[in-house]
Image (cartoon, rainbow, N blue to C red):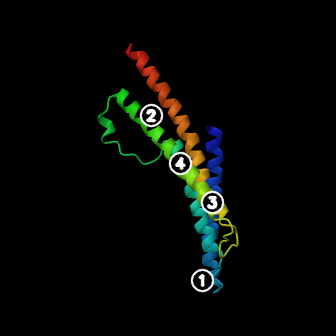
Amino acid sequence: MKTLNKVLEYILAILVVVMVGGCIWQIVTRFILQNPSDWTEELVRYALIWMTMIGVPYAYGKGQHISVTFITATFTKKGAIKDKIFIEILVLILSVFVMVAGGIMVSINAAGQVSPALGIPMQYYYIGVPICGVLMVIYAVDRLIRFVKEFKELKKEEK
């Protein structure tokens, strides 16, 4: 997981640099050269989409996603681990069916479409959804295994 995290960190950093560079170029061309660039807005938009599709599983895998804990804080340790296992199973199911399967269908439906300013096939943009889903599955399986081990250890301690 550390290697995957590092790879995603580099990809996210590159996307941020691309977005900042695109914004700066748009400002230069619009206000200094008085001839706004046509392609920078689209580049920044799609870089933001890809940053989101890569950033969500990265944050999820590192446990830095948003969570509401006012209910789960009242659970026993065993109940909290059961809850975590249930959530991981739910995330796994949603990732496979909604993001991976749905994302593949959307990508296939985008065949033949081309982005207006950059002229890049739209499938390259939409493929981010199933990639995000696959990354979510990888992280969910890793977390699920970890929580099941914790639950087993807790059951051994009780005996």
Q: Is residue 15 above or below residue 118?
A: above
Q: Is residue 89 above or below residue 153?
A: below
Q: Nearer the viewer, mark 4 or mark 2?
A: 4
Q: Are marks 3 and 1 in contact (CB under 8 Å)?
A: no
Helix, strand, or loop for circle 2? helix
Alpha carbon separation for disc pair 3 and 2: 31 Å
Sequence-wise first label, 3 or 2: 2
Sequence-wise first label, 3 or 4: 4
Helix, strand, or loop for circle 1? helix
Q: Residue at x 43, y 16 (%)?
A: 156
Alpha carbon separation for disc pair 4 and 2: 18 Å
- The type of residue carrying mark 4 is Phe
- The type of residue carrying mark 1 is Phe
How packed is label 2: few (under 14 Cα within 10 Å), some, or many (20 or more)? many
Image quarter in which the N terminus is found: top right
Alpha carbon separation for disc pair 2 and 1: 53 Å
Q: Give residue 91's position: percent from left, percent from top.
A: 48, 43
Q: Residue at x 64, y 42 (%)?
A: 4
Q: Which residue is mark 3?
A: 107
Q: Are marks 2 and 1 in contact (CB under 8 Å)?
A: no
Image quarter in which the C terminus is found: top left
Sequence-wise first label, 4 or 1: 1
Alpha carbon separation for disc pair 4 and 1: 46 Å
Q: Give residue 100's position: percent from left, percent from top.
A: 58, 50
Q: Which residue is mark 4?
A: 97
Residue 80: tell me if it is visible.
yes
Residue 17: tell me if it is visible.
no
- The type of residue carrying mark 3 is Ser
Q: Residue at x 56, y 54 (%)?
A: 102
Q: Which mark is residue 85?
A: 2
How packed is label 3: few (under 14 Cα within 10 Å), some, or many (20 or more)? some
Q: Which residue is mark 1?
A: 31
